[in-house]
């Protein structure tokens, strides 16, 4: 069982930056790819970014490519999402998730464990 806890959300003005953190309860490096998703009110949960087990490979949704960066520190069992040039449409609850395996996948159903989410609100 993997427990994930997100932090770092908050209120930021458009054009600003935030860094989200996801702390894992167990060592995820050897077995799990990790991902970030978000869900805005009235919308389905959508894929944002994924990173493989050793951080050597990443994949981004087009909507955040060039603005967001996913990284991981396996020594600390921690996943990060650096968000720059934030826009109002980035407002959502952000979730981290763990996917058992080495492939980078974007489907919500591919991920085995989820955090509780952290709210990000971007104001104009």
Image (cartoon, helix red, strand yellow):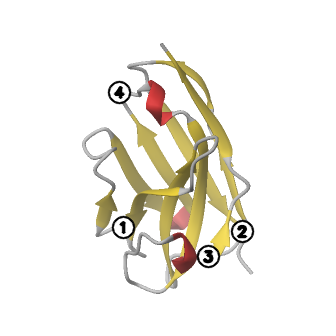
Asked whether the beta carbons under mark 4 and mark 1 sit within 8 Å of each other, the answer is no
Instruction: Quote the CA–CA distance across marks 2 and 3.
Output: 7 Å
Mark whose residue sits in front, 4 or 2: 4
Give the mark nearest the N terminus, 4 or 2: 2
Q: Kindly identify the residue that appears in the image at 64 percent across and 40 percent down.
A: 41
Tell me the residue at 66%/73% (across/down): 113
Q: Earlier in the sequence, mark 4 or mark 3?
A: 3
Q: Give x and y (percent) for residue 38.
A: 55, 50
Badge 1 marks a residue whose secondary structure is: loop
Tag on residue 55?
A: 1
First reached walking from the N terminus: tag 1 or tag 2:
2
Instruction: Please give the name of the residue rendered at 54% of the width and 33% of the height, measured from the top-left corner.
Output: 91
Q: Nearer the viewer, residue 62 or 79?
A: 62
Q: CA distance from mark 3 to mark 1?
A: 14 Å
Residue at the disc numbered 3:
27
Single out the mark in the foreground, 4 or 3.
Answer: 4
Residue linked to disc 2:
25
Quick one: label 4 or label 1, which is nearer the N terminus? 1
How far apart marks 1 and 2 lie (CA) works out to 18 Å
Residue where numbered disc 4 is placed:
85
- Look at the numbered disc 4 and give the secondary structure of its residue: loop
- In the displayed structure, would residue 59 be above or below residue 53? above
Q: Secondary structure at mark 2?
A: loop
Residue contact at pointers 4 and 2, CB within 8 angstroms: no
Mark count: 4
């Amino acid at each position: 069982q993997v427990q994930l806890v997100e932090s770092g959300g908050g209120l930021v003005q458009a054009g600003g930056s935030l860094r989200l953190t996801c702390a894992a309860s167990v060592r995820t490096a050897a077995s799990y790819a990790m991902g970030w998703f978000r869900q805005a009110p009235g919308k389905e949960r959508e894929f944002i970014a994924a990173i493989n087990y050793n951080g050597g490979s990443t994949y981004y949704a087009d909507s955040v490519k060039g603005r967001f960066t996913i990284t991981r520190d396996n020594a600390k069992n921690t996943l990060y999402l650096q968000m720059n040039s934030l826009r109002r449409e980035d407002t959502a609850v952000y979730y981290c998730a763990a996917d058992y395996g080495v492939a980078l996948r974007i489907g919500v159903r591919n991920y085995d464990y989820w955090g509780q989410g952290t709210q990000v609100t971007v104001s104009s």
